[in-house]
Every structure is written in structure tokens, then in C-alpha cells.
């Protein structure tokens, strides 16, 4: 297997460009509907009910992104193809950034609704605390990558750890918070987003927004994967040509032989 | 002569005994900058019926203004994404050429 084979990506041609243009329009439509659309006017929440469209999709990106990272980590362990290591890292990175945005927006939302007048920014809502723990577990993945020396060792350690980090995700973000009293819908075992939790006029905007943000995250993820792969290919080419040119930070940490 | 010097004519009008121009009763004729700093004059603006783009933007607790700001931010993000993607496509084409 040549180095280029292990980094092969699909072609990002006309179909891809049409797709990302559609994603841009889709998210724009979701923003317009989310901000101007009808909402069920509730006490405490008022206009902040619209945050449903922007805060909750961040969590969907965190979860799905880490499942993608786990998938590519498993593929890396099975095949050793470098592209899976690149994909796993970038999926984890995009997902974690969206997760951090999610927890930050949640803190701001709660502060000016349920906790207005109390000066409480961080409350002990079980979902908030457990998601913070999950984000620390996710963050450790990048610490591990930074600490491991050597490309192959780093990739294998990171892949094994990503499987663990993703395995805790359903429990910390889904199962355990539902078994405790929480501000979030779905507490105490009832299904989240049931008829009682979301007004019919808000349901479809919410679905559109969730799909839109997932696709936006995918778009950013493809750009990042392609950037890292291009950097690795340039480094490989410099090695083949015997050039001692400057190496980017994508280049292998271990020098090639004496 | 004053009539031959327009700049002097302006100065003399400002010093007219009718007082400073922002004290004029009709707020539409006042100096806008001063009117915006002066809450009483700003109130006089707000009492008028909104027209044109204002009628649209002031509806629903001024929510459309939020949309306008969000869309401007979003267009900026999109421009960055699209331009990064194009630049990346150029680099990929360069890498595909045999060295």
C-alpha cells in the first residue's frame, strides 16, 4: 500500500459544491424561521423558547460527531489506513467544539430564565453537570493525542480512547440525566420532545434546524479533513523527493530513519 | 459684504436671536446628531408612526433586527467557508499533478 493509498479521499467535485450551497441555503432558512416564526409563548421562557432551535442541535452534533469519530477509530484499528485517523480526529474536534458551544449557550439560557434574579450562572442541573463531565472526557482525547509521540502510536492510542469516550456518551448525556429531576425535557423518564414538550408550530422548524446544523458540521468537517490530508500528502511528497524542506505541523513527529 | 461670503452667512445665522437650531419645535428639522443624543428629541422621533423599513423592523419587539444581525454574521461565516473551500480545492489540484 503506497502512502497515497492510505490517504485517499472521495472526489469533492460539482456534486459536493452543489450540496454545500444547498446546506448554506437550508441553514439560512432555518435561521429566518427560527427567529421570525411563531412560538408558543410561555412564562419564564418567552422569546428564549427560540433557543431550542439553536441550543439543542449543538448536542446532536456532539453526539453524532463522536459516533463518526468512533466509527473511523474502529476502522483505523482494523485497517491502519491513515485517512481514518485523520477523519476520527477531525470529527471529534468539530463535535467537541459544537459541544462547548452547546454548554455555553445552555448556561446563558438558564441564567436569564429559570435562574433570573439569583445570579446563578452554573447550576446543578444533572444534564448540564454530566455533559460537562462528558466534555472533559472528550477533551482528554486531544490531550492524549498531543502527549503521544510517534504517528502510529498516537493514532492507535487515540483510536482506542475514542471508543471509550464515545461509549460513555449515551449514558452521561441520555440515560442518567433522564433518571433525575431536570430542567430539560425528558426528565424522570418521559420521552423528550413529546407532544407536551414541544408545540406543533415549533416542531418542524426544530427538525429543520437540527438537520441544518448537522449538515453544516459535516461541511466544516470535510474542509478540515481535506486540509489535514493535503498537508500529509505534501509532507509525504517532500519525503519522497528527499527535500529537507520545512515541515508543517501535519508532518510525522518521528523523523524518517538515520 | 456678507452676501458675497456664504461661510460668514452661516455663522451669522447660528448667532441669530432665535436661539440654537436644535430648539426648533419640529424634530424633523433638527440636527440629527444632536437629536439622537437628546432623549427628549429622540422621544419626539419615536412618537411618529414608523414608515417603510422601520415598520417592518420594529414589529414583534424589534425581533427582525435580531434576524438582520444574525444574517449578517452568517453571511460572513459562509463567505469564509466558501473561500477556504476554494483555496483548498486549488491546493488539492496542485498535489494531484505529478511532481
Image: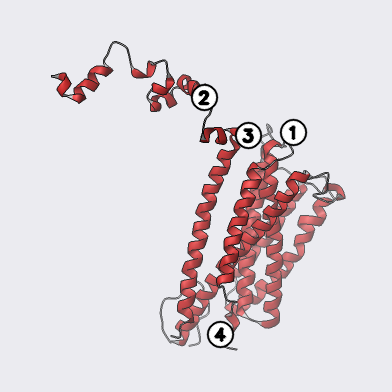
Residue at label 2? B46
In the displayed structure, would residue A255 be above or below residue A166? Answer: below
Q: Nearer the viewer, mark 2 or mark 4?
A: 2
Residue visible at 52% across and 36% down in the picture? B53
Query: Which circle, 3 or 1, is nearer the viewer?
Result: 3
Q: Which chain carries label 2?
A: B
Name the mark on residue A78: none
Relative depth, front residue between A3 and B45: B45
Gap in Å between the C-alphas at discs 3 and 1? 17 Å
The disc at residue A43 is: 1
Are discs 2 and 4 both within one chain?
no
Please say whether residue A160 is visible from this viewpoint. no
Q: Position of residue A61 (x, y in %)?
A: 68, 59
Residue drawn at point x = 76 percent, y = 56 percent = A173
Q: Residues within 10 Å of mark 3 (few under 14, many from 20)?
A: few
SS state under label 3: helix
Q: Please say if the residues under marks 4 and 1 sit with CB atoms less than 8 Å apart.
A: no
Q: Do labels 3 and 1 share a chain?
A: no
**In the foreground, A130 or A8:** A8
Vertical arrangement, residue A44 with respect to residue B4, above or below: below
The residue indicated by pointer 4 is A3
Callout 2: SS: helix
Residue furthest to the front? B52
Amino acid at each position: 500500500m503506497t502512502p497515497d493509498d492510505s490517504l485517499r479521499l472521495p472526489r469533492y467535485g460539482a456534486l459536493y459544491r452543489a450540496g454545500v450551497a444547498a446546506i448554506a441555503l437550508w441553514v439560512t432558512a432555518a435561521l429566518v424561521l427560527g427567529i421570525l416564526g411563531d412560538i408558543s409563548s410561555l412564562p419564564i421562557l418567552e422569546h428564549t423558547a427560540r433557543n431550542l432551535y439553536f441550543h439543542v442541535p449543538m448536542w446532536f452534533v456532539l453526539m453524532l460527531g463522536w459516533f463518526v469519530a468512533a466509527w473511523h477509530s474502529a476502522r483505523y484499528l482494523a485497517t491502519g489506513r491513515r485517512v481514518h485517523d485523520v477523519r476520527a480526529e477531525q470529527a471529534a474536534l468539530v463535535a467537541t467544539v459544537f459541544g462547548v458551544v452547546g454548554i455555553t449557550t445552555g448556561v446563558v439560557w438558564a441564567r436569564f430564565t429559570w435562574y433570573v434574579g439569583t445570579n446563578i450562572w452554573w447550576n446543578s442541573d444533572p444534564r448540564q453537570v454530566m455533559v460537562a463531565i462528558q466534555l472533559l472526557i472528550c477533551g482528554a482525547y486531544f490531550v492524549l493525542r498531543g502527549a503521544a509521540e510517534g504517528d502510529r502510536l498516537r493514532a492507535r492510542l487515540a483510536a482506542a480512547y475514542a471508543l471509550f469516550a464515545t461509549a460513555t456518551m449515551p449514558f452521561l448525556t441520555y440515560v442518567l440525566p433522564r433518571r433525575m429531576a431536570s430542567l430539560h425535557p425528558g426528565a424522570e423518564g418521559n420521552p423528550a420532545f413529546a407532544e407536551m414538550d414541544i408545540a406543533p408550530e415549533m416542531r418542524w422548524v426544530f427538525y429543520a434546524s437540527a438537520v441544518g446544523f448537522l449538515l453544516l458540521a459535516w461541511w466544516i468537517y470535510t474542509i478540515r479533513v481535506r486540509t489535514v490530508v493535503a498537508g500529509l500528502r505534501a509532507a509525504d511528497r517532500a519525503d519522497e523527493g528527499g527535500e529537507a524542506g520545512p515541515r508543517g505541523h501535519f508532518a510525522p513527529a518521528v523523523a524518517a530513519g538515520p | 459684504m456678507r452676501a458675497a461670503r456664504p461661510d460668514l452667512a452661516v455663522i451669522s445665522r447660528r448667532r441669530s436671536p432665535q436661539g440654537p437650531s436644535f430648539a426648533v419645535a419640529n424634530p424633523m428639522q433638527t440636527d440629527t446628531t444632536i437629536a439622537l443624543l437628546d432623549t427628549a428629541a429622540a422621544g419626539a422621533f419615536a412618537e411618529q408612526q414608523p414608515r417603510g423599513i422601520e415598520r417592518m423592523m420594529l414589529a414583534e419587539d424589534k425581533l427582525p433586527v435580531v434576524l438582520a444581525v444574525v444574517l449578517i454574521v452568517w453571511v460572513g461565516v459562509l463567505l469564509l467557508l466558501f473561500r477556504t473551500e476554494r483555496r483548498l480545492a486549488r491546493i488539492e489540484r496542485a498535489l494531484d499533478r505529478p511532481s
